[in-house]
Image (cartoon, rainbow, N blue to C red):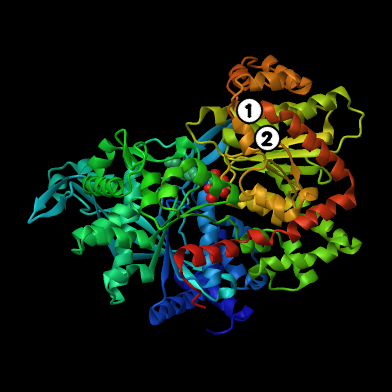
Amino acid sequence: MTEVTAPLLKADILRHLTFTLGKDVPNASLYDWRMALSFAIRDRIVEPWFASTRKTWETGHKRVYYLSMEFLIGRLLEDATINLGLRDMADQVMSELGQDFRAIVEDEPDAALGNGGLGRLAACFMESMATLGCPAYGYGIRYEHGLFRQRFESGRQVESPEDWLMSRHPWEFERPEAAYTIPFKGEVVTRDGREVWLPGETVQAEAYDTPVIGWQGKWANTLRLWSAKPTTMFDLERFNRGDYTAAAEPEALARTLSRVLYPDDTTYQGKELRLKQEFFLTSAALQDILRRFKAGGHSLRDLPKHVAIQMNDTHPAIAGPELIRLLVDENGMEFMEAMEIARACLGYTNHTLLPEALERWATFTFGSVLPRHMQIVERIDAWHRDTYHPPHWVGIVKHHEVRMGELAFIMSHKVNGVSALHSDLVKQNLFPELESLHPRIINETNGVTPRRWLKMCNRPLADLITKTIGDGWEADLDRLKELEPHVKKKSFLKDFDAAKRANKVALADWIAEHCGVTVSPDALFDVQVKRIHEYKRQLLNILETIARYHDIKANPQADWVPRVKIFGGKAAPGYVVAKEIIHLINDVAAVVNNDPEIGDKLKIVYPANYNVSLAERLIPAADLSEQISTAGKEASGTGNMKFMMNGAPTIGTLDGANVEILQEVGADNFFLFGLTAEEVIERRRNPDHARDAIAASQSLQDVLQMIAEGRFSPDEPGRYHQLVHRVWHHDYFLVAADFDAYRAAQAQVDKAYADRAGWLKMAALNTARSGFFSSDRTIRSYMADIWDVTSAL
Ligand code: 26V
């Protein structure tokens, strides 16, 4: 491939502006420039992409297939320029063309094809697999509407549809030739002793490919997203009869399948459309995998030698029965052999223990949407029962429900949790009986890609790291350890401070413009960003904020360490309690921010519509990372790792990957508080745990009193009666029990922050010791322990 130079890149951009977009320079808009630049950059990805595919075919290398209902990719332009080593050149060339590179980057809409952690993990994994030269395909759905947009009206969350595809998505290639028929419903008949599925409906799955380029452009993989199209476009007979709307019905019906991402990641609802989406993704992926495999000329018996399929949670767990169906019904294999082959290919990652999020489909729904799969599931279950004699309460089909966790477990050769603590809990609490019958649970602690989450989003810090330890750390994050000797040096800490401060100044400007709140960059930026969920305890954070407000009011002259409390996150549209918490945060913000006695001592900001791009802005500017879930509930967390990398110490509980963060960074550099997972269980045995905790805490009494009196909702004093009632009487997530410990930890933070040199050292050590949390480490471990695949580089 020809070396890229600035003049060549400029010529490419101008060529695309003219010939791809049909615009001349004087008439080009920001959008046109963004497209022209994106196409010019994309051109540079295509060659390594082809080369990677070619090499995989030539060497017959094993491939990994990552099946996920969500890929939360965010923006791609800057990421691509970073991995190709072209960011500075692109910046320079655009300014020569009279354009602002940052403005162009920020004009790109986020691809928000995910809810939160699970979807963002899939995106980080795709980038790491490309970086490591692991031949891989990601399979997902090309939702027309990603996660909803959030805005606040009088402090309440209001949702509106997201329309990232309204402007052209320049990174994808439509593949009309890669299309499969996806069957649903109908009935199963027996013909010549074999089961034959006669579907009642079909839709077409059509592929759209986005190349995923790894660090330094050495390897590229494909993210293949499926879009639903009708098998018959149009009912011509109806049209000719003048029934124009009805004529378009089949088309509209089919397209609903890939219309919208389910925005509720808290409760599983058993909706037929969701099951159809899951099967749509899975069947299209498996048909594509088998087509490619056969093109390689191998025998289906050898499938596990060439193919590893990872199920991202149970959402694609229909992969077990579907692979059996394709092998048996369409390729004439024996059932038992098909089952063994499927299991040797499949792996299952569990991402949650919350019982309400575990998928279970009513056999009625399952059997009517997927009648053939219902038979297959029953056969797997019967085989399992007769062969292993599990306790009577263990099995796939129980109480007229198909349990997708049990199905995924039995159909996989490896099952993994996403942090050390979580994997232990998966073993002990979720699948204890299955694990003792067939041990297969392992741990794969999550990670995040340091290219996006350090190099790209935090230029000041990334430049300082390179200046200090040289380059190469981006793909070898353990090298950050080399920063440790420098952490003792005043000059390094001064530079580290300057980098953090530059990010904080930039964020303060952004907040002034977008939230209308003035914050001082000298204040401690305390950040909690993640989905709003009771177990994540944003409520605990806002209660502590109110306590702080109360104390400042009582003693305004004291030497307060100025704080900015920053919140970000969306609530599932139907999650009433989560929405109430959002409302409370905004109500408290309105009172505190407008109290003249408070000034810079305390400010609360809650920018609307938290997404990947906003995370990239907030995390580099954070001084403190809030990871305060009820112990035992957060499977891992990945935001916690991003904050650590960007030099923000954690205030947190012993939950998820916090445990490993604490281990890596050391107790002196982490603000630990709260009940442990075991203590949480123990404490709940006392039905009065909340009342006892409130009785013991004057501060918590004051806070609850202020809320109950309507101090933050003067227009509607009773607005939070229910919320306060829940803390007293239904405090399942132990907000009251951990309140005093959390306050004490926050007081420690204030004290530590006041010691500038001590704080900077702690912050820098967080970066220096974050190497373990690179998703490269995670992917290497999946490759060795689950996929049995090596790098093709
Ligand atoms: C669950 C459901 C339930 C059914 C309907 C749709 C839907 C969509 C998404 C989910 C995902 C819930 C699980 C999840 O996101 N877990 C998070 O996974 C992260 C990556 O492993 C981990 O860091 C977080 O701790 C965990 O909450």
* x then y, percent, for residue 221: 47, 69
| Residue at (83, 33) in percent of width and height | 599
Q: Amino acid at mark 1?
A: Arg
Mark 2 closeness class: few <14, some 14–19, many ≥20 residues within 10 Å:
many
- Which element carries disc 2, helix, strand or loop? loop
- Tell me which residue sits at (67%, 71%) in the image: 88
Query: Going by the image, does 51 lie left or right of 198?
Result: right
Between 617 and 29, the one nearer to me in the picture:
617
Pointers 1 and 2 in contact (C-beta within 8 Å): yes
Residue 342 vertical position relative to residue 55 in the rendered view, above or below: above
- Relative depth, front residue between 440 and 66: 440
Decide if residue 286 is on the left or right side of residue 707.
Answer: left
Name of the residue lying farthest toward the bottom? 2
C-alpha distance separating marks 1 and 2: 9 Å
**Residue 675 - label:** 2
Is residue 553 positioned above or below 183 on the image? above
For residue 683, which numbered disc appears in the image? 1
Q: Position of residue 416 (x, y in %)?
A: 49, 53
Any atom of ligand 1 within 8 Å of the CB at mark 1? no
